[in-house]
Image (cartoon, rainbow, N blue to C red):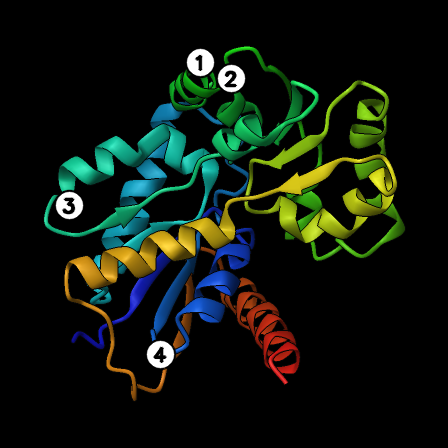
């Protein structure tokens, strides 16, 4: 048993969609969430820049005493996961990548779309995964223009957000796709808009948050580092941005947690 916290890292608010799934599945695990904030968004940056941000973030979490790190950012995973695992070889590090595999294996039309950042869509990891699982499947690659900025500014429920999502998603209707993969952890916060736009079109939305939580659960058991079943979880939030940003992380997380508690009744 190990009551030390799990560390979760993202460029900003997006990783809270993964944090939510961890809280849902592992209610006894404490979590320290690091939302960079200062350098967000990552999508258009170089691999070298993103790797430097990721290394600094994981080091900060290690300094805080975490037992495991979840890189809750698709872009940081594609750019830096191998480097992070080489540096911290004795600590489990879980990364994210677009849920291309399950989408390709379950498509009925042979055509799917992947919404992600520019960097993720041109990364070696994405191209390798697509090559491995998309034989006979056409994968449409689409950048979620302005999606990250909208979520970071807290406008995901606005008319502006709906218009931005419609501009990206509406052209996919009628293209023959039956799956839309959300390849950035910011994008699930826009999922209600996506679902509304494709409603009745036979298109499923796929993201990897729940699968990542299950992977974390498995690793906790494998390495015998799960928290005690009677441990009271604590959640902390840190950032490289200012205190106002950190408080925003905390407030958003509280809102997510409140909704989880309500849904459990």
Image label count: 4
Instruction: State yes or no: discs 4 and 1 in contact (Cβ < 8 Å).
Output: no
Closer to us: mark 2 or mark 4?
2
Secondary structure category for the residue under label 1 = helix
**Residue drawn 84% across and 54% down?**
158
Look at mark 4 in the image and give the residue it sits on.
28
- Along the horizontal axis of the image, is 77 left or right of 39? left
From the top left corner, tell me how far across and down residue 185 is, in percent. Answer: 55, 46
Instruction: State yes or no: discs 1 and 2 in contact (Cβ < 8 Å).
Output: yes
Q: Of callouts 3 and 1, which one flags the residue occurring earlier in the amino acid sequence?
A: 3
**Could you tell me how far apart the alpha carbons at marks 4 and 1 are, in whole angstroms?**
38 Å
Residue furthest to the front in view is: 108
Between 67 and 263, which is closer to the camera in this rendering? 263
Q: Is residue 37 visible?
A: no
Q: Which mark is residue 221?
A: none
From the top left corner, tell me how far across and down residue 233 is, in percent. Answer: 37, 81
Look at mark 2 in the image and give the residue it sits on.
134
**Could you tell me how far apart the alpha carbons at marks 3 and 1 are, in whole angstroms?**
29 Å
**Could you tell me how far apart the alpha carbons at marks 3 and 4 are, in whole angstroms?**
25 Å
**Could you tell me how far apart the alpha carbons at marks 1 and 2 are, in whole angstroms?**
6 Å
Q: Of callouts 2 and 4, which one flags the residue occurring earlier in the amino acid sequence?
A: 4
Q: Which mark is residue 131?
A: 1
Binning the other alpha carbons within 10 Å of mark 1 as few (below 14), some (14 to 19) or many (20 upward) gives few
**Residue drawn 20% across and 39% down?**
85
Look at mark 3 in the image and give the residue it sits on.
88
Closer to us: mark 2 or mark 3?
2
Q: Of callouts 2 and 3, which one flags the residue occurring earlier in the amino acid sequence?
A: 3
Between 195 and 39, which is closer to the camera in this rendering? 195
- Along the horizontal axis of the image, is 170 left or right of 72? right
């Amino acid at each position: 048993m190990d009551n030390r916290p799990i560390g979760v890292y993202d460029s900003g608010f997006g990783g809270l969609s993964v944090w939510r799934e961890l809280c849902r599945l592992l209610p006894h695990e404490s979590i320290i969430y690091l939302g960079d904030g200062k350098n967000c968004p990552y999508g258009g940056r170089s691999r070298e820049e993103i790797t430097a941000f990721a290394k600094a973030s994981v080091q900060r979490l290690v300094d805080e005493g975490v037992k495991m790190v979840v890189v809750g950012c698709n872009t940081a995973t594609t750019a830096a996961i191998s480097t992070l695992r080489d540096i911290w070889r004795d600590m489990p590090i879980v990364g994210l990548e677009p849920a291309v595999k399950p989408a390709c294996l379950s498509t009925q039309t042979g055509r799917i779309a992947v919404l992600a950042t520019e960097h993720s869509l041109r990364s070696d990891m994405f191209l390798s995964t697509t090559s491995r699982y998309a034989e006979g499947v056409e994968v449409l690659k689409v950048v979620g223009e302005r999606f990250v900025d909208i979520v970071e500014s807290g406008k995901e429920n606005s008319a502006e957000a709906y218009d931005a999502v419609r501009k990206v998603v509406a052209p996919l209707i009628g293209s023959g796709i039956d799956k839309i993969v959300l390849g950035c952890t910011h994008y699930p916060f826009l999922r209600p808009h996506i679902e509304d736009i494709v409603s009745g079109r036979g298109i499923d939305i796929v993201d990897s948050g729940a699968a990542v939580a299950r992977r974390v659960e498995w690793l906790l058991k494998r390495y015998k580092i799960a928290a005690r079943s009677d441990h009271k979880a604590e959640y902390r939030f840190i950032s490289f941005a200012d205190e106002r940003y950190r408080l925003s992380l905390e407030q958003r997380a509280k809102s997510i947690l409140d909704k989880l508690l309500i849904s459990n009744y």
